[in-house]
Amino acid sequence: MTYSLDLREKALQYLDKVGDRKKAAETFGVTVRTLANWIRRKKDDCLAPKPRKPSPSLIDSDKLKWFIEKKPDAYLREIAAEFGSTPQAVFYACRRLKISLKKRLLITRSGMRRGENNLSRQSKKFPKETVST
């Protein structure tokens, strides 16, 4: 969490008056370690919060959209090979762009059909036995 420069200065001024880090930390709702970091940074004259760097994306969003439009049946591993990254990176990039790449193997579908056909044949050959009482 980033604290404002104003809060940091007030906390350090209060710490100078009181002299107790624990009490100052409780008063301003920060940890003692945070106060120690602020004291160190004040000595270096850089008390202001550091600007955050955005996390770099290895996969360009526009290029990924274009590639998926061009080859909508491509698997994650194929896209990863094209972009020189991992399938996990492609998965998270697609998730960031709200693109779903769900696939069902042709073998699985034909296997399911065969299984359904086998079940219907078996039920015709072997009708359910009735138990007489």
Image (tube, rainbow, N blue to C red):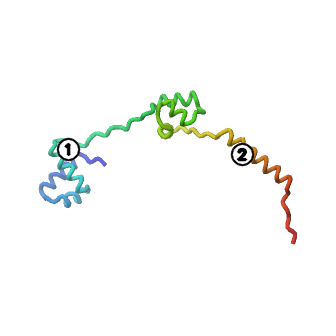
In the rendered image, residue 16, in percent from the top left (x then y), is placed at 12, 54
Under circle 2, the secondary element is helix
On the picture, is 29 further left or further right than 84?
Answer: left
In the rendered image, residue 63, in percent from the top left (x then y), is placed at 48, 28
At label 1, which amino acid type do we have?
Leu
Q: Nearer the viewer, mark 2 or mark 1?
A: 2
Does residue 118 sit above or below 85 in this rendering? below
How far separated are the C-alphas under marks 2 and 1?
65 Å
Residue, disc 2: 112
Residue, disc 1: 47
In the rendered image, residue 109, in percent from the top left (x then y), is placed at 69, 42
- Callout 2: few (<14), some (14-19), or many (20+) C-alpha neighbours within 10 Å? few
Under circle 1, the secondary element is loop
Residue at 18% from the left image edge and 48% from the top image edge: 40
Does residue 128 sit above or below 106 in this rendering? below
Asked if labels 1 and 2 touch by Cβ distance under 8 angstroms, the answer is no
Quarter of the view holding residue 14: bottom left
On the picture, is 53 further left or further right than 127?
Answer: left
* Number of on-image labels: 2
Residue at 24% from the left image edge and 52% from the top image edge: 34
In the rendered image, residue 20, in percent from the top left (x then y), is placed at 16, 60
At label 2, which amino acid type do we have?
Met
Residue at 57% from the left image edge and 35% from the top image edge: 75
Query: Image quadrant for the C terminus?
Result: bottom right
Tag 1 or tag 2, which sits nearer the N-term? 1
Residue at 16% from the left image edge and 42% from the top image edge: 45
- Callout 1: few (<14), some (14-19), or many (20+) C-alpha neighbours within 10 Å? some
Q: Nearer the viewer, residue 28 or 36?
A: 36
